[in-house]
Image (tube, rainbow, N blue to C red):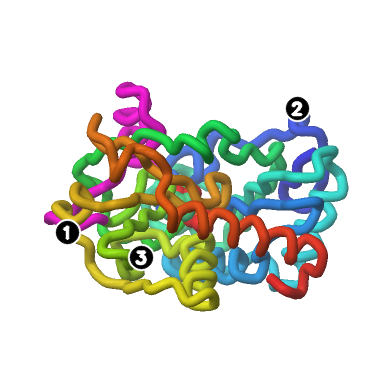
Amino acid sequence: MIYLNGEFMPLEEARVPVLDRGFIFGDGVYEVIPVYSRHPFRLAEHLDRLQASLAAIRLANPHIGAEWTRLVHKLVGLNEPEDQSLYLHVTRGVAKRDHAFPPGVAPTVFMMSNPLVTPTASQVEGGVGAITAIDNRWLRCDIKAIALLPNVLLRQLAIDQDCAESILVRDGFVTEGAASNVFLVAGGVLLAPPKDHLMLPGITYDVVLELAARHGIPHEIRPIAREELQGAREIWLSSSSKEVLAVTQLDGQSVGDGRPGALFKRMYALYQEYKELVMRSPAAS
Ligand SMILES: Cc1ncc(COP(=O)(O)O)c(C=O)c1O
């Protein structure tokens, strides 16, 4: 079941006019919320980021937080899986094609649920391969825009080389992955690039840094040079579906000893423990 403009219906019945500005211009924003045992994870934070994306593209939020919460819970209840990936999407609505904002047009609001697919046991235990690529996206990567063509092309570069992700480098510094945030471990310290307009402020990124702070893992938020990535002992990716995942091959070279590192294993365990806690008592998220 999906949600479209006020109605819940089977996916097959959902229709959007071809003049929707999401279709014509990619003029919209989205969120992906992981749902564990029917509890949306960090829902308030996802809704805050949605609000920030909407404000950045100058589109009024069609719902207040309590309405979004009600709609999200209802859609979760209408779908089978216990663990879901909830996709939420708002566009500037349907109007005759013209770049200028159309006056008085209602936004299109769409939500769908897919089964949540997290990394396989072998990916968690063995890590994944990644490549580096030049970050050639626009300068507002902090907006979770539905216009993802650069991310699609960058991710495909990795797939073409049998890798899971492209790690992006702009002007010599690591920004993020094509659909994930990036961390590295050097000299026993967890390093993360600072949030700015060149990366998406990941909800999972925040969770990883909160867990590091709470459990006394030395960490530093600062720009990361490409050379540091190449010499890192450990590299991790984070996202709502990847959770936290080790990169063990970068551009065909082993990262560290080519196995997920000790700090990764610790963070992975902390993350799973935290998830369990949130599932038992959602207020803890
Ligand atoms: C470009 C990009 N960066 C980072 C992330 C990670 O964000 P989150 O942890 O909120 O899923 C995503 C998620 O899909 C993304 O597309």
Q: Position of residue 91 (x, y in %)?
A: 54, 52
Nearer-the-camera pick, 2 or 15: 2
Look at the image and give the residue range highlighted in magenta: 147-174
Task: Name the residue that disc number 1 marks.
Answer: 225
Residue for point 63% across, 54% down: 33
Residue for point 77% across, 68% down: 282
Residue 30 in sight in this render: no
Task: Name the residue that disc number 3 marks.
Answer: 190
Task: Name the residue that disc number 2 marks.
Answer: 12
Nearer-the-camera pick, 39 or 255: 255
Disc 2, SS: helix
Structural crowding at the residue carrying mark 3, measured as other residues with C-alpha within 10 Å and reported as few (<14), some (14–19) or many (≥20):
many
The mark that comes first in sequence, 3 or 1, is 3
Disc 3, SS: strand
Disc 1, SS: loop
The mark that comes first in sequence, 3 or 2, is 2
Q: Position of residue 22 (x, y in %)?
A: 50, 44
